[in-house]
Amino acid sequence: MPTSTSAPGVGDARFARLRRGINLSHWFAQAHSYDQAHFQSYITREDIQLIRSIGFGHVRFTLNPAILLDEDDPGTLNAENLGYVDAALDMILAQDLAVIVDLHPEDDFKLKLHDDEAVRSFRTFWRALASHLSARNPELVFLEVLNEPVLKEAERWFAIQAQLLAAMREGAPAHTLIATAHMWSSLPELLMLEPVADPNVVYNFHCYDPHIFTHQGATWSMDFLPYLAHLPYPSSPEAIAAILPQITHEEARQAALEYGAEAWDAARIDEWLGQAAAWAEQHRVRLTCNEFGVYRLKSLPEHRNAWIRDVRNSLEKYDIGWTMWDYAGGFSVVNTQHGRRVTDVDTAQALGLA
């Protein structure tokens, strides 16, 4: 059942801004360097105009806190880099796109949250950043507490998140906050989360399921994934049998066989995402999935776009907002032609935008 009529804290008009979006990766996070040249050239006004023309209603602005954070004085934001952040937000908002400001640090930053002093520092930082952002329209700017927490202890993360959300609320009384679960914001962990008392919070999870399909060819995840290519979707034993001779790595072969036996298709995805919808309905909260996508390097376009279409259809069926990963990275919604980014029309169609 859709959650829109049962969640009193976030109004329909504001939540509508979170329905269809795209991640702006590798700009203010996940970049090799953070300097003026990169900030002003990696994403330009032309990119933002293209995003708007494709039909997206918001972007997720991934922001590495290291750009703004002085660990010796976490309540004072780096003034020079804050100017670049503000300029980027101004450029986005000028195109009538809403923005999720998502704190998106490296894993070593997140691992430090085992330490209480690191939590106190992060809380002070978030209060200062939220206060700065509070001058912006709360109908258009959303604040996301942390991308994919890595802590494995659910109760530890839930306690930390409650402190961070409280600090964010002190800084930005009117803005909608976005919270998540532990262990990389996966769906099973979401189902363990108990919402906080603050009604102006949207809850978030990420969907890369099944991981073997969405990350085939990836070098940063499980060791066998680089040995996989052209995995079919939907999956079945018969479909896997057709490509099995190409897979020489034994662990990769076994994983592919399991993927085929699991028979991932639209119905299975709908059942999977239906659990999230049921959780949101039970707790009377709004829900987003602000990362989902398929790594492009070794996935076939027709299979990749079929998965994207099925996930998007189910998210919309359950009134779950969505933000695809990503605009111009390894999972992108654009192609580069003659040095310019152009829409991947098939992917846009899978997203219901073309």
Image: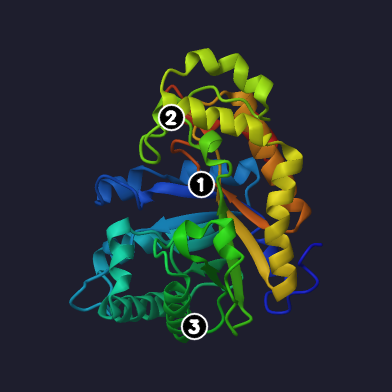
Q: Secondary structure at mark 3?
A: helix
Tell me residue 34's x, y (percent).
Answer: 26, 51
Residue 48: numbered disc: 1
Q: Nearer the viewer, mark 3 or mark 1?
A: 3
- CA gap, disc 3 to disc 1? 29 Å
- CA gap, disc 3 to disc 2? 47 Å
| Vertical side of 277 occupied by 153: above or below | below
Quadrant location of the C terminus?
Answer: top right
Residue topped by disc 2: 251
Taking the view exactly as shown, the residue that stands out farthest to the left is: 72
- The amino acid marked with disc number 2 is Glu
Residue topped by disc 3: 169
Tell me residue 221's x, y (percent).
Answer: 39, 41
User: Badge 1: few (under 14), some or many (20 or more) residues near its Cα, within 10 Å?
Assistant: many
Tell me residue 235's x, y (percent).
Answer: 66, 29
Q: Secondary structure at mark 2?
A: helix
Q: Secondary structure at mark 1?
A: helix
Disc on the earlier residue, 3 or 1: 1
Disc on the earlier residue, 3 or 2: 3
Tell me residue 98's x, y (percent).
Answer: 57, 60
| Residue at screen point 59% across, 33% down | 259
C-beta proximity under 8 Å, tags 3 and 1:
no
